[in-house]
Image (cartoon, helix red, strand yellow):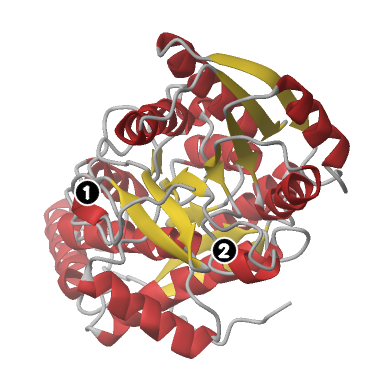
Amino acid sequence: MRTPKIAVGLASLALVLAACSSESDADSDASAETATASAEETTTEEAASVDVIKIGSIHPLTGGLAADGLQMDAGAQLAAADINAAGGISCLDGAQIEILSADSTGTPEVGQSEAERLIQEGVIALVGPYQSAVASNIATVAERNGIPFVIDVAVADEILTQGYTNTFRIQPNASAMGSQGAKFLKELTDAEGIEVSKIAMLHEQSAFGTSVYEAFKTAAEANGWTVDPVISYDAFGVTDLTTDMTKVKDAAPDVIVVTGYYGDGVLATEAISAVDPGAKLIYGIAQGAFDNPSFPADVAGAGEGFFNVNYHLDVTNPVTVDLANRFAESYGEEMKTSATHSYEAVRVIANALETSCSEDPAALRDAIADTNLDSILATVGPIQFDETGENINGSPIVMQVQDDAIVQVLPENVAENAPRFN
């Protein structure tokens, strides 16, 4: 397990505002002194500056998702370092951002308790956490405490259907992933003249995988496609998918869709290689392996030609490319899209601090709600949130493994190469 080299060393300074007044026997003198003290206190408050602004970063730093969680925390740390190097929050007299890191261990209850701890330690906002179940618990804490929570990665729709006012999400939600996945699949197959009637789907069984499946199934059936068989599994308990892939082969689908995390994505690839189910396309939707930079080498080329619909850092944007290069140089690994989302989440909070000129969480929340920030992700527009906290311009794109590299292929405005078909 790699320990991030990126760190932001910031000294914490507490400022105490004090106003002095003296008592007098005369009512008029007391009133005058009270007015003077009040004026002095107001002047002191106006002149006061915040030296350090704390933001909590909650991700799985240990356990099965640590490879992603450590990168995401490093992405948040790098964002703070970049903001601080550029002078900090200018309208707060150059206040510096400090990231307080917390380990969710991939467990909702731990993520919740860590959010509570960070708030007690003085964070004014939270980012995280990579898993939908963990995000749901953190969102309840954020709402109860009136602390803004910017989700970098967590897809389940229901996180933002509770009427919360303090939680915001940068990435597209499950419905967008599933429905856009079906839309892109139709575009790809229609353009290539590939006939599709039956689709098999394997998905991890938590709220994440289930919600993506349900959205995809609805859109697929609207296209006249049958989604069968559907196989769900425990992403963190499964050790082999060969038997499941044999069932898929027996059903003779035209397309195999896979939704899940990295480990189970590798297992699915190994099973496909072993069984050779004969599908025309292998197609990930929110699949954590198929667009991961490590994937082609980890499966020894078995994933060549696999597609994946997912959010992605924009490799056609020079700003994003520079960020990814600096991250790789500092961290020692190629920057994953999830880490870019964490960087972006801190940018959103810093932008809102500049807009609100306040460290008050309520003012910060209102400024985040009004965000209009150019994104370093491959998307259809700037980051803007609707009344539920969803990024209205959050959009997945299509990538493909080509010559052992992850390549953007659709839509055309972010495509590096054209899609390839066997």
Q: Closer to the camera, 212 or 285? A: 285
User: Residue 309 vs residue 37: left or right?
Assistant: right
Residue type indicated by callout 2: Glu
Q: How crowded is mark 2: few (under 14 residues within 10 Å), some or many (20 or more)?
A: few
Tell me the distance, in whole angstroms, between the alpha carbons under discs 2 and 1: 46 Å
Instruction: State the residue position of label 2.
Output: 121
Q: In which quarter of the image is the N terminus?
A: bottom right
Query: Residue 403, position in %: x, y?
Result: 49, 68
Q: In which quarter of the image is residue 190?
A: top left
Residue at the image position 27 percent from the left and 55 percent from the top: 415
Drawn side of residue 387 relative to residue 9, left or right: left
| Label of residue 412 in the image | 1
Judged left or right of residue 244, residue 183 is: left
Give the camera-side residue of 286 and 342: 286
Crowd around label 1: few <14 · some 14–19 · many ≥20 (10 Å): few
Whether 111 is drawn above or below 173: the answer is below
Res. 252 in view:
yes
| Quadrant in which residue 365 is drawn | top left
Residue at 40%, 51% in the rendered image: 420
